[in-house]
Amino acid sequence: MSGVAITGAAMTGGASGGPWPGTVLIAGAGRGPLLHLRQPISFWGGVDPASGRITDPASDGAGRSVAGTVLAIDRTRGSSSSSAVMLELIHAGAAPAALLLAEPDAILAVGVLAARAMGWPHPPVLRFDTAVLAALADGTVLTVEEGRVAALA
């Protein structure tokens, strides 16, 4: 695991300038608009593995798609099958471009690691404090590459 920081103008509420420290859990590169889920989500039964659409009606992201987003998640819940759903999302081309987690989720990460082991393109997985994720402006286009997260102007 290595250090990472968010830089740029992605923060809300006047929290600009950065950097805001985090940790790389699984290296990789990705770029997309931020989708921040503040309520816990289970990928098993909560995300359609073929399309990436959030099907959990209790989710604050219900009806939206995780595909191609930089997906920030405060907390996951539920199933050990989330790794299989993540692997299916990656295989279908419907996975997030990157994952930013407030709480590391080893089960979700296993799906990413399995995709990496199979030689498939996979999203990077990073950990940031909840306060950092809360300050990120939803919809801001972020790029994650070589251990850096930056907001595109």
Image (cartoon, rainbow, N blue to C red):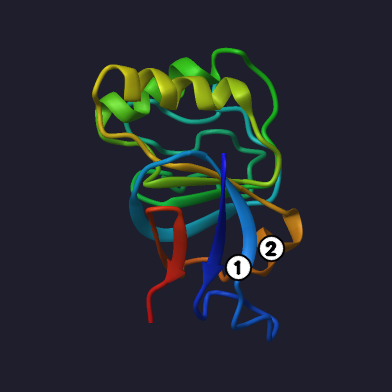
Q: Secondary structure at mark 1?
A: loop
Q: Is residue 61 above or below residue 9?
A: above
Nearest the viewer among 132 and 41 is 132
In space, the residues marked 1 and 2 are separated at their CA atoms by 7 Å
Q: Is residue 118 left or right of residue 97?
A: left
Question: The C terminus is located in which quarter?
Answer: bottom left
Q: Amino acid at mark 2?
A: Val
> What residue appears at the point 58 percent right and 34 percent down from the top-left corner?
56
Q: Is residue 53 left or right of residue 58?
A: left
Nearest the viewer among 6 and 67 is 6
The residue indicated by pointer 1 is: 136
- The quadrant in which residue 52 appears is top left
> What residue appears at the point 40 percent right and 43 percent down from the top-left corner?
96
Q: Secondary structure at mark 2?
A: helix
> What residue appears at the point 68 percent right and 21 percent down from the top-left corner?
78
Residue 101 visible in the picture: yes
Q: Amino acid at mark 1?
A: Leu
Residue 47: x, y in percent? Answer: 48, 31
Residue that protrudes farthest toward the right in the picture: 131
Q: Is residue 109 left or right of residue 122?
A: right
Q: Residues within 10 Å of mark 2 (few under 14, many from 20)?
A: some
Question: The N terminus is located in which quarter?
Answer: top right
The residue indicated by pointer 2 is: 132
Residue 51: x, y in percent? Answer: 33, 34
Residue 81: x, y in percent? Answer: 54, 13
